[in-house]
Image (cartoon, rainbow, N blue to C red):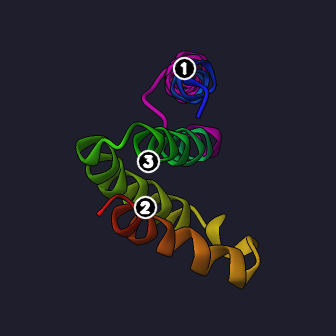
Amino acid sequence: MNQNLIFAVGFLAQTLFSARLLVQWLYSEKAGRVLSPLLFWQLSVVASFLLMVYGILRHDLAIIAGQSVTYCIYIRNLHYQGSWQRFPRPFRILAWLFPLIALLWHG
């Protein structure tokens, strides 16, 4: 696969991780207290997913394994905020299975 495309996936993932921190900072500053807004967790899930894809493309088990853990935590937090249930059930099932699929794909 084209190395530039692989690096673009990784760069996009890192950009989203940076964007989530900016979102949290702006929301927290506006509220005058520390917040974890819904958008923070949504950006986290997408960024973590992309970083797992990047790990698959780079054949890097450490990236895949590390992101699998945080990815599940981000989904759990979306669940606690009540937004995870809004997604269609097939999507939620595939989303939960993706880390396992990514680890098996690498192996």
For image coordinates 60% across by 75% down, the residue present is 94
- What amino acid is found at the position of numbered circle 1 in the picture? Phe
Q: Main secondary structure of the magenta part?
A: helix
Q: Nearer the viewer, mark 1 or mark 3?
A: 3
Classify mark 3: helix, strand or loop: helix
Q: Position of residue 21 (x, y in %)?
A: 49, 22
Point out the tag, 2 or 3, that comes first from the N-terminus.
Answer: 3
Q: Earlier in the sequence, mark 1 or mark 3?
A: 1
Q: Is residue 18 magenta?
A: yes
Q: Nearer the viewer, residue 20 or 90?
A: 90
Mark 3 sits on what residue? 56
Pointer 2 residue: 102
What's the distance in space between the residues labelled 2 and 3, CA to CA? Answer: 7 Å
Q: Amino acid at mark 3?
A: Ile
Does the CB distance between marks 2 and 3 fall below 8 Å? yes
Report the residue at 23% width, 43% height from top.
62
* 97, 55: nearer the viewer: 55
Task: Using the image as rendered, state which of residue 61 and residue 46 is in the foreground.
Answer: 61
Residue at disc 1, secondary structure: helix
Q: Which label belongs to residue 64?
A: none
C-alpha separation, residue under disc 1 versus residue under disc 3: 15 Å
Mark on residue 11?
1
Q: Is residue 64 above or below residue 16?
A: below
* Sequence-first disc among 1 and 2: 1
Location of residue 11 by image quarter: top right
The residues colored magenta run: 13-40
99 relative to 18 in the view: left or right: left
